Amino acid sequence: MERASVDHLAHERNKAQFDVEAMKIVWAGSKHAFDVSNRMARLVANDPVFSKDDRHLLGRKELFKEAMRKAAHGWRRINELRLSDEEASRFRSFIDEPSFIDAHWEMFVTTIKGQGNEEQKQKWLPLAYKLQIIGCYAQTELGHGSNVRGLETTATFDPRSDEFVINSPTLTSTKWWPGGLGKASTHAIVFARLKLGTQDHGVHGFIVQLRSLDDHVPLPGITIGDIGMKFGNGGYNAMDNGFLRFDDVRVPRNHMLMGLSQVTREGKVLESNVPRQLAYGAMVYVRKFIVSEASTALSRAVCIATRYSAIRRQFGSHDGGPETQVIDYKTQQSRLFPLLASAYAFRFVGEWLKLLYTDLTRRIQSNDFSTLPEAHACTAGLKSLTTSVTAGAIDECRKLCGGHGYLCSSGLPQLFAAYVPACTYEGENNVMLLQVAKFLVKIVSQLGSEKRCVGTTAYMERVEHLMHCSCEVREAEDWLKPYVAMEVFEARSMRMLVACAQKISKMPSQEEGFSELSSDLAEAATAHCQLIVVSKFIEKLREDIPGEGVKDQLEVLCNICILSLIHKHKGDFLSTRSITPKQASLGNDQLRHLYTQVRPNAIALVDAFNHTDHYLGSVLGRYDGNVYPKLYDEAWKDPLNDSVVPDGYTEYLRPMLKQQLHNAKL
Amino acid sequence: MERASVDHLAHERNKAQFDVEAMKIVWAGSKHAFDVSNRMARLVANDPVFSKDDRHLLGRKELFKEAMRKAAHGWRRINELRLSDEEASRFRSFIDEPSFIDAHWEMFVTTIKGQGNEEQKQKWLPLAYKLQIIGCYAQTELGHGSNVRGLETTATFDPRSDEFVINSPTLTSTKWWPGGLGKASTHAIVFARLKLGTQDHGVHGFIVQLRSLDDHVPLPGITIGDIGMKFGNGGYNAMDNGFLRFDDVRVPRNHMLMGLSQVTREGKVLESNVPRQLAYGAMVYVRKFIVSEASTALSRAVCIATRYSAIRRQFGSHDGGPETQVIDYKTQQSRLFPLLASAYAFRFVGEWLKLLYTDLTRRIQSNDFSTLPEAHACTAGLKSLTTSVTAGAIDECRKLCGGHGYLCSSGLPQLFAAYVPACTYEGENNVMLLQVAKFLVKIVSQLGSEKRCVGTTAYMERVEHLMHCSCEVREAEDWLKPYVAMEVFEARSMRMLVACAQKISKMPSQEEGFSELSSDLAEAATAHCQLIVVSKFIEKLREDIPGEGVKDQLEVLCNICILSLIHKHKGDFLSTRSITPKQASLGNDQLRHLYTQVRPNAIALVDAFNHTDHYLGSVLGRYDGNVYPKLYDEAWKDPLNDSVVPDGYTEYLRPMLKQQLHNAKL
């Protein structure tokens, strides 16, 4: 951490009632994870090539050039320092610049690993690992996003030459959005409809070389470019999201990814005996990663807003003394502290997903697919919930910083613009929620049958009880009993799902029911996912957690998480009669009391995220709280301040000020 | 409207069940208002100088230069065409580029009119009207936003020279944020603490010349600059929000705005006999304007999202036919149509505020200030409600456009980034809500006394009834009776306010109560403001509205507005027992039915906003629906596509691809 000579937040840090260093380990997940992150963050922060200071001032070309420069330098450093895979991955994440190199490692390499056969892995992975080729993942098209089955690009087998011929038959079939495609990639995994004669065999992946390895010029038949500017000043504009069209581009037969299906020399499609479900396993892998990333992004925004709320003062001056720190206002606390609690909650559910994935992998390897649908639904739902909440929370944190949050130097515009795509990629959030809802309604419809409810749906086995139980809260403190909260969340989720299932059963068809009730279904799925988040936080607190006062703080945060969700979704809890209006009101009283308990620990709780000033990239969120002098310094750096009199004065302002227009009104 | 050769939305337009041209008049407010807007919008749209096409590609300096160019050209055209004040104001708004010229007209001119004395108006207004000076409004400081009383800049009267000496005593006293200050303004109205000897007489406004009228160089003692980049690619970056510091800057005594208070030659402060309340009248004026602007911004976002939802198709293909238009999905409808209804609702409440302001002005002129507090609270609350909803809705519309909404060419990033400051300026939204809440709680505490509840608080006179009435809805259609909905909203608001008042009365002090319960208070104020919006929509429908089917459509929208608010705030309605869970569920059933009624009219309902393609600035929202070819064309314009091989390839990519690093892993 860049320690400052003066720490304007020292008095806040001194108030902390727990061991911050121990909390850092809890946040990181383990001592080892903390050490790696801590070292990598500082390696990046101390390297001037990775400076982010002028990012918001760069034009499109310069931004992309910077991204290439950072990627090349990062690659060199990773090799020079002989970083492990784990270290390299953390190192790259702290560079904090979306770029083609992410698409290469996270999409291209991962897909070959997951969908290539052994021969293909042996051929392509070494090239990819050494960056002798740069790859991307070309699935979505101009007219086709979430619905993979609607893709239009074709790959037609030509038995004479033993090749596939790839074409973009329509404008809407143009590949559109793939990161790294626009300018950097030499290769792509292209998803296209496999055609054999007149037969359409659905969508498969093909490795296609896009550009010459000699001079980077696109190969014949390939039209390629960048799709243009996206939201935000820096944001995702360092990424070359691209478009791609094919005009009779030929690739050898063995460029089709053959891990799951094969096309033989004779032009026959063979399904491998590798179970289809493996693809779901890969989705679980990616989405658990996104949940972890959500907690990180949320923690950054919360850290900035919390620190600045302790620095900023407004109103409440008595006798000319200093104004009140805005963090002392209940309105500020009621908006900020639930987000702080959510950051921790998402962290723990992310950690738990890692265990889930380990368990899932072990089962799949021994051909046990029994938990796969539940694990898939659970990660899809958590992906949707955590990214939606985080995107909204980043914007809320901007507002919590008042006007200054709107300045690029606050770091929040960049964080927001670069984060919101997470709501869309790897499963659009609303599409995800409906998938989860359908899965859950199916579970409900099977209740009472032989079928057991596993994992996060296990509570549904107690449907009889949950449909009729009533919440036992009589006074505000009763809300602090974890089993009380758990049952309330279970009852709400269960009752919403059963209500949906009943309404659907009255519809002419199930399909029509799902369509007509999709809003209700999405709300029920959200209720279920919130239950998962809450229950994993409560489970975490059953563990032995070392460090003075650490567990006490987490208990307070867990209760804030629970009660602020109940308040926010009071309509669900009341309409399902999971709680009474009186109990809701008691919950609110308790919530205010919990805010008071967090208040002295707030700065220490965001310090525990262990973010460097480089990674935060925010004047408002500086560790030392030295906000105002630095905001003033930052302002001077704007190009408009290069000259006292602005360029354009002579052409536009002066004539207006000097020429008394003959027909000026008055 | 730029008519296209092919209209991809023609089949949608043919479905409309009402007279779109008549609806355009309703939306505009009158035939006259429609004519003016329609002519001005097209004048701007057809002038190539006002093109917005490359806005997101411009660097900071170029953006500002473009803003100056457009301002100068706009000024020339306004004079050449001899536009009326009304026409000129509409003309400027369609240029759709935040710039110093807005600050000049809306802040500088307005403040001199409102706070100057006759002599000052005669001196300064002619200069300002002819743009011989450019002015701005310098109130907020680096460390001081909403709390005007906390400002630190000082203006000390020097009786010897008959001047004020203006100083910035601290870093946090630096003027910060004023639009037009950074680079363009020659003058500012500076708000500073008036000091006479050792006495502090609070904050007053002073006209200060900032720059030489000869060469635009800042005058001695003045340090001035731009505060730097803000959120978004274009956004507010065409505006030179500035900072300003004073080092013993002297202005003549008569540069203090003396409409309300005066300082005499002898150094005595005289309060004028003009009532203080006039300042509130000015706030009402500005805020009613902001409410109108909210409906406009919301209508733009909704127009883009609605048109693209009719073009975009996804899933649901049967037998290889086309996929389903996303506007046909209930999830899309349940997110989009309430926003469409809100746009109309905000329009009508904005129109009503104009009448309120006219009435208020007439009363003030005859020294009747009785309705002022209520009018002030009402506009403050509606300002907060409509801008918060609109900012969120623009982002929601971006999401409703899927991934493509994230492209600058969708127009939504620009709209969002340029709109969100409305939540902060002219009264920060949360501060506003608490002000409104305090006003309302005071009214509640006076119930039963002689004091009458006027205007939008009149319903509180029926407190006895509203505390005990129960909603009579028995089947879904009952929700369509306007008086049913009205009473439900009144009961909810009344009960929330009474609950707050009761809780506060149990606190040790009222101040502590307000502080502790601020979240509850903000929610109660929101409930009251939603009641105003709903009631003004219902009142509008009691008018005679010409045009076939127009009123029917508005009735559907009004009911969507009502029922979607009830759904969204179900927790409030249930916990106050204003409705039962069963009634909430019936409301939801009715809501889905209403969506079905809007569906065929959706495109025509957004056509009625009469937005030009220029004003929308969105490929996705094009009138002709020709989205995909134009998205493809737009992409090619990105500077990254100037060359096939990107600048930086040779330095960064090629060495990575070519050099087999000795220590590369694997």
Image (cartoon, coloured by chain):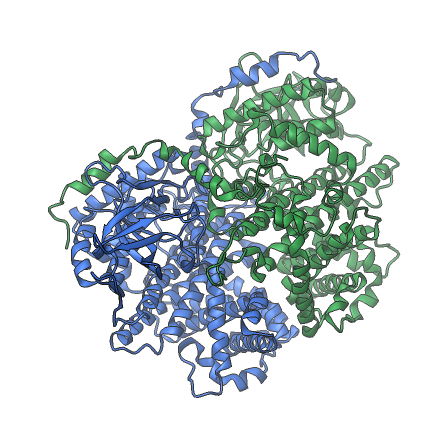
Chain colours: A green, B blue
Q: Can residue A56 be seen at all in this image of the molecule?
A: yes
Quadrant of the rendering where the C terminus of chain A is positioned:
bottom left
Between B38 and B630, the one lying in front of the other is B38
Between A150 and A49, the one lying in front of the other is A49
Residue A622 percent coordinates (x, y): 56, 41
- In this rendering, the answer to whether A317 lies above or below B650 is below
User: Residue B115 falls in which quadrant of the image?
Assistant: bottom left
Would residue A76 appear left or right of B157 to someone viewing this image?
right
The residue shown at (66%, 71%) is: A585
Quadrant of the rendering where the N terminus of chain A is positioned:
top right
Residue B430 percent coordinates (x, y): 50, 61
The residue shown at (38%, 32%) is: A639
Would residue B361 appear left or right of A535 to someone viewing this image?
left
- In this rendering, the answer to whether B156 lies above or below A620 is below
- In this rendering, the answer to whether A653 lies above or below A243 is below
Residue B178 percent coordinates (x, y): 36, 49
Residue A285 percent coordinates (x, y): 74, 38
- In this rendering, the answer to whether B189 lies above or below B563 is above
Between A16 and A640, the one lying in front of the other is A16
Q: Can residue A193 be seen at all in this image of the molecule?
A: no
Number of numbered callouts drawn: 0
Would residue B462 appear left or right of A124 to someone viewing this image?
left
